[in-house]
């Protein structure tokens, strides 16, 4: 059996595995990524890309590829609508911006803002960006059959599914991004905890060249997503390419058999042509793994959390896992990471998975409060009253799913062993209302320091010490980190507004852009602080 050696092996080339490949490439770490399928996206879902994810893409140099792909119009209005039926009465609408307009609207809190980039575009984009760099290799139609770990590393056996040839891979770290049905978590004996199968669903992916024109003619504008209230099974329609590709998802009963074509046609209620590309059942969960790995074998993405697709938390949470894990593995391979650094991965990311998974489940529960009512379609005064009452309920209960900047940018590593608490109260944490903060563990606040240049653009390669007071001498701080061989740069900013945003004259930003420490002056024992933030304290 042929043998190869590589510092990191990744299993699974979904968005999380591909994000980890890009993060490792950014840090010049070699990897091998294996994927049992051919990599084609057979069922597109998960098109909402969060602001924080886009900031990572910005750091990797590929944000514009996600915002302006050829396959999705950047000027498509991302309107959300609730209707009695697709061809019925509009009950409530949440007007949305276009992908190209979002950065300007979000510029006060993020250099990027969120974007809609369907999975059929997003996954190949991440793959191509990773392959453009020379740091790693991606092998499709390649399966990991087994792995064994010891104190020095992991030995895995992989099989080329086309030739049948096997290969032994010796790696220092194995990261499984192999999803909820992946075998790595099971082989480690790690269980999911939470509620499985909270609801049964069915989704169809189809082509309809004339549906968009019919919708615009009916309502005077296109919609990114259309939710129904009175249609059987309460289907909701999502555009996949802003042109002719669509996804229709609906609630169904357990063991209910769905014939896709007539069900889709009946749900649309319009005289349109429909070609079913793929249809499949799916189930909503609320589960998080008990642990995020074992020694040198780590888990990320759906391998450690499964949730309802209500809010777009899936891939975005997993990409956050990849970024957190990527800089820590790089630190260990580069020799400056401490022996407790890897353990901080679970301590930091598991609470975020619990937070996001519960928020998605809450969105599902709120959606269950929207119930069919025959009066909604009535032309009488009773119908007018019923529609007004439903509009009020929808605005009260359903708007938050589509306005989640607090979730996207406000998550923080509150109990991280790598962040130094300063005794100040934790700021509010609200899923909708985002307020920037330099509280240790928070994502460092964004501010423009030059035309088109965010302060976030200066973070990433190593630690960054930001100083807002020109009278503070930084030599001792730099010497303390250099004594521990921890990569660090300084950034002096004289803008008083940015200083107020960061609250303190000194802020230490980690390679992943989170605040590790803040203070009024250089601490007395800088090497001790360096040991804390590098996982050696």
Image: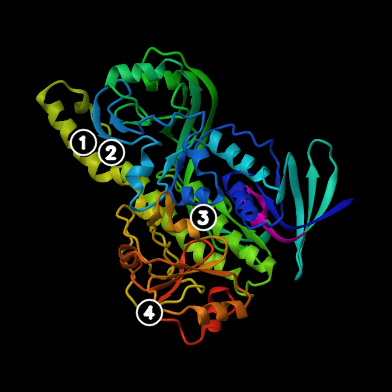
Task: Mark 2 or mark 1: name the one nearer the start of the chain.
Answer: 2
Task: Mark 3 or mark 2: name the one nearer the start of the chain.
Answer: 3
Identity of the residue drawn at 46% across and 60% down: 352
Residues at marks 3 and 4, CA–CA distance in whole angstroms? 30 Å
Q: Residues within 10 Å of mark 3 (few under 14, many from 20)?
A: many
Residue 155 x/y as whole percent? 79, 59
Marks 3,4: beta carbons within 8 A: no
Q: Is residue 336 magenta?
A: no
**Res. 386 in view:** yes
Mark 3: which secondary structure?
Answer: helix
| Residue 161 to residue 70: above or below | below
Quadrant of the rendered image containing residue 262? top left
Residue 53 x/y as whole percent? 48, 49
Task: Mark 1 or mark 4: name the one nearer the start of the chain.
Answer: 1
Q: Residues within 10 Å of mark 4 (few under 14, many from 20)?
A: few
| Colour scheme employed for the rendering of this structure | rainbow
Closer to the camera: disc 3 or disc 1? Answer: 3
Query: Which quadrant, please, contains the C terminus?
Result: bottom right
Q: Which residue is mark 2?
A: 370
Q: Which residue is mark 3?
A: 320
Marks 2,1: beta carbons within 8 A: yes
Residues at marks 2 and 4, CA–CA distance in whole angstroms? 51 Å
Q: Which residue is mark 1?
A: 390
- Please provide the residue range marked out in magenta: 171-185
Task: Mark 3 or mark 4: name the one nearer the start of the chain.
Answer: 3
């Amino acid at each position: 059996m042929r043998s190869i050696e590589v510092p990191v092996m990744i299993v699974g080339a979904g968005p999380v595995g591909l994000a980890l490949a890009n993060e490792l490439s950014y840090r010049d770490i070699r990897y091998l990524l294996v994927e049992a399928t051919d990599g084609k996206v057979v069922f597109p879902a998960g098109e909402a890309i969060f602001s924080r994810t886009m900031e990572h893409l910005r750091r990797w140099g590929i944000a514009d590829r996600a915002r302006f792909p050829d396959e999705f119009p950047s000027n498509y209005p991302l309107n959300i609508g609730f209707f009695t039926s697709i061809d019925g009465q509009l009950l409530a609408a949440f007007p949305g911006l276009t992908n190209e307009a979002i950065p300007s609207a979000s510029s006060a809190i993020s250099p990027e803002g969120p974007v809609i980039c369907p999975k059929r575009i997003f996954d190949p984009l991440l793959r191509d960006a990773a392959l453009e760099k020379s740091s790693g290799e991606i092998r499709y139609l390649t399966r990991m059959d087994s792995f064994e770990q010891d104190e020095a590393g992991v030995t895995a056996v992989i099989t080329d599914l086309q030739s049948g040839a096997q290969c032994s891979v010796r790696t220092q770290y194995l990261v499984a991004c192999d999803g909820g049905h992946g075998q790595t978590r099971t082989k480690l004996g790690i269980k999911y905890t939470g509620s499985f199968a909270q609801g049964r669903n069915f989704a169809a992916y189809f082509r309809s060249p004339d549906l968009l024109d019919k919708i615009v003619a009916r309502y005077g504008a296109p919609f990114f997503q259309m939710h129904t209230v009175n249609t059987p099974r309460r289907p909701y329609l999502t555009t996949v390419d802003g042109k002719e590709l669509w996804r229709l998802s609906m609630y169904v009963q357990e063991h209910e058999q769905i014939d896709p074509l007539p069900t889709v046609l009946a749900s649309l209620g319009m005289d349109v042509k429909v070609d079913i590309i793929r249809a499949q059942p799916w189930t909503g969960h609320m589960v998080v793994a008990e642990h995020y790995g074992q020694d040198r074998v780590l888990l990320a993405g759906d391998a450690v959390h499964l949730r309802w697709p209500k809010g777009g938390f899936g891939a975005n949470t997993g990409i956050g896992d990849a970024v957190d894990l990527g800089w820590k593995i790089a630190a260990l391979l580069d020799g400056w990471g401490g022996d407790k650094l890897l353990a901080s991965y679970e301590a930091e990311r598991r609470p975020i998975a619990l937070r996001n998974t519960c928020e998605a489940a809450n969105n599902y529960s709120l959606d269950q409060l929207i119930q069919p009512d025959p009066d909604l379609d009535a032309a009488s005064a009773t119908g007018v009253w019923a529609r007004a009452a439903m509009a009020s309920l929808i605005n009260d209960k359903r708007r938050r799913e589509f306005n989640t900047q607090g979730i996207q940018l406000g998550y923080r590593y509150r109990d991280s062993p790598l962040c130094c608490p300063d005794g100040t109260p934790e700021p509010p944490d609200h899923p909708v209302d985002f307020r920037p903060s330099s509280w240790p563990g928070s994502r460092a606040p964004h501010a423009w320091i030059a035309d088109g240049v965010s302060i976030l653009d200066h973070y990433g390669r190593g630690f960054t010490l930001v100083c807002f007071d020109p009278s503070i001498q930084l030599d001792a701080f730099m010497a303390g980190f250099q004594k521990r061989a921890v990569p660090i740069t300084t950034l002096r900013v004289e803008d008083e507004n940015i200083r107020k945003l960061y609250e303190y004259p000194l802020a230490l930003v980690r390679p992943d852009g989170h605040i590790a420490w803040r203070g009024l002056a250089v601490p007395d024992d800088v090497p001790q602080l360096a040991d804390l933030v590098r996982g050696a304290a």
